[in-house]
Image: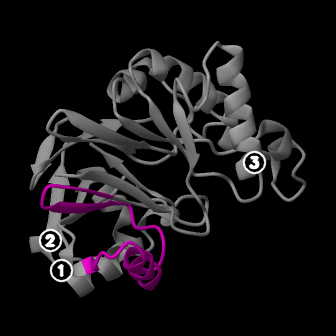
Amino acid sequence: MKFQLCSLNSGSCGNSTYISAGGTRLLVDAGLSGQAITTALAQINVLPETLNGLLVTHEHIDHVRGVGVLARKYRLPVYANYRTWQAMHRLVGDIPAAQQRIFDTEQDFFIGDLNILPFAIPHDTVEPVAFRVHYGHRSVAVATDLGHVSKRVLTRLSGADLVLLESNHDPDMLINNDRYPLHLKRRIQSTQGHLSNAECAQALIKLNDSGVRYALLGHLSQDNNTPELAMQTVCEALIKSGLTPGRDIMLDMTWRDRVGGMYTIE
């Protein structure tokens, strides 16, 4: 059976990723409106009522904006750790208790055919996680909103068939952005903030050594990055390290304003 991943949207204004295998269909985050996610799913021929669950990484609005609407309208189970449930309640509203699923960070669990591992990441929320999703001997991972890639995070991502990894900002664009106050710039650049393009590249170089061969660049800032700059920065760093993009590791973009490609792991 096909193991598939598709970014419905990835960026500072909203994030949602579709993952499916066997008879199981999931969303990682729902950071767009319920209607926008329904429209995005229609573009890949998926009805929201056929989803088996919605996984939440953390409580920031660009990851939970549509969670409550989708859960209530389509009676979807929502999975988050206890502290994230507490923090996001005011943003998502009431969700029936029967649809609330609480997982323990660093403890894997099953949803249908998929084995889910939520693992801790460094970000400025109460208990943020990324997810690695296994189907048989294959796996994919979604890891955005992390201020740095720790050894533990590298271990959790190592050997995945496909990794969607944050490539949030270009430091020069951020520093020279007069619309951003100093405290916000410091937050983004902190070890609990967001990965720069160069930091993403260094992580991918290490992950390639572990067997990662496909990577999607995600969660690009609308104000402090461009897809072209992110790809250029990452490719230049890979080449400098001796890797050949397109041969040693396949790279592609996710998009902050449209549905990305559907990637199939055989």
Residue 20 highlighted magenta (yes or no): yes
Closer to the observer: label 2 or label 1? 1
**Left or right: where 7 falls relative to 27:** right
* Identity, as a three-letter code, of the amino acid under mark 3: Glu
Q: Which residues are magenta?
A: 19-48
State the CA–CA distance, disc 2 to disc 3: 41 Å
Q: Residues within 10 Å of mark 1 (few under 14, many from 20)?
A: some
Residue appearing at x 48%, y 73% in the figure? 32
Residue at image coords 38%, 75%: 41
First of labels 2, 1 by sequence position: 1
Residue 122 visible in the current orientation: no
Q: Residue at x 64, y 22 (%)?
A: 238
* Secondary structure at numbered mark 2: helix
Question: Residue 186: where, in percent of width, then height?
Answer: 73, 40
Q: Nearer the viewer, residue 170 or 247?
A: 247
Horizontal and vertical percent position of residue 48: 28, 78
Residue hosting label 2:
99
What residue type is disc 2 on?
Gln
